[in-house]
């Protein structure tokens, strides 16, 4: 049961990041207009992180395909979520940030917690473990 939940988790993570990546790769201008956010002076600043989200989506699909075999990739997903939340929270608390970026923090924190759970759940019980991930 636990493995099937982990598979579903990483499929959902792949869809979430993949759809966000596609949206910002192909419709960034429309999204900025919709949320009344001034776009950057060049959309390359948006397209590169969007492309990275697509790379992470592929990684999450690889984890879903073989959770135990690709357990070593899960910390990279955790770092993605920590990176986004840290950057958004820093800018939110130090100088303001358009509301467009804030809801993703909630979802990424949820994913982060679930990724930690999945990583711990996939430990090999036959091996001794240290406190570090």
Image (cartoon, rainbow, N blue to C red):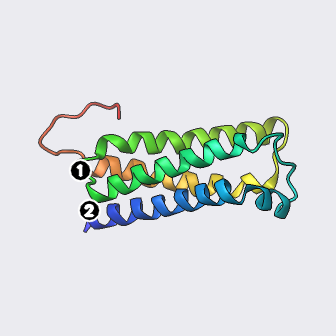
Q: Neighbour class for label 1 at 10 Å: few (<14), some, many (≥20)?
A: some
Q: Position of residue 102 (x, y in %)?
A: 72, 53
**Residue that appears at 81% across and 35% down:** 94
As measured in the structure, the alpha-carbon distance from the residue carrying label 1 to the one carrying label 2 is: 9 Å
Residue 118 located left or right of residue 51:
left
Say which of 2 and 64 sits in front.
64
Q: Position of residue 73 (x, y in %)?
A: 35, 42
Residue 122, relative to residue 26: is it above or below? above
Task: Look at mark 1 in the image and give the residue it sits on.
Answer: 68
In the picture, the quarter occupied by the C terminus is top left
Task: Look at mark 2 in the image and give the residue it sits on.
Answer: 3
**Residue that appears at 81% across and 42% down:** 40
Can I make out residue 112 in this image?
Answer: no
Give the label on residue 110, or none: none
Say which of 79 and 118 sits in front.
79
Q: Quadrant of residue 99?
A: bottom right
Q: Position of residue 11 (x, y in %)?
A: 41, 63
Q: Quadrant of residue 132?
A: top left
**Residue that appears at 56% across and 51% down:** 109
Q: Earlier in the sequence, mark 1 or mark 2?
A: 2
Residue 60 located left or right of residue 81:
left
Residue 78, relative to residue 32: is it above or below? above
Residue 24 located left or right of residue 74:
right
Q: Dot 1 lies on which element?
A: loop
Verify CB contact (< 8 Å) between mark 1 and mark 2: yes
Q: Position of residue 56 (x, y in %)?
A: 47, 48
């Amino acid at each position: 049961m636990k493995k099937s939940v982990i598979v579903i988790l990483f499929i959902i993570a792949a869809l979430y990041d993949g759809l966000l990546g596609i949206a910002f790769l192909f419709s960034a201008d429309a999204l900025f207009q919709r949320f009344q956010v001034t776009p950057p002076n060049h959309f390359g600043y948006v397209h590169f992180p969007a492309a990275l989200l697509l790379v992470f989506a592929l990684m999450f699909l690889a984890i879903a395909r073989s959770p135990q075999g690709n357990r070593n990739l899960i910390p990279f997903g955790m770092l993605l979520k920590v990176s986004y939340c840290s950057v958004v929270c820093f800018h939110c608390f130090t100088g303001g940030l358009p509301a467009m970026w804030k809801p993703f923090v909630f979802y990424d924190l949820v994913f982060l917690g679930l990724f930690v759970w999945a990583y711990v759940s996939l430990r090999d019980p036959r091996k001794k473990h240290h406190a570090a991930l």
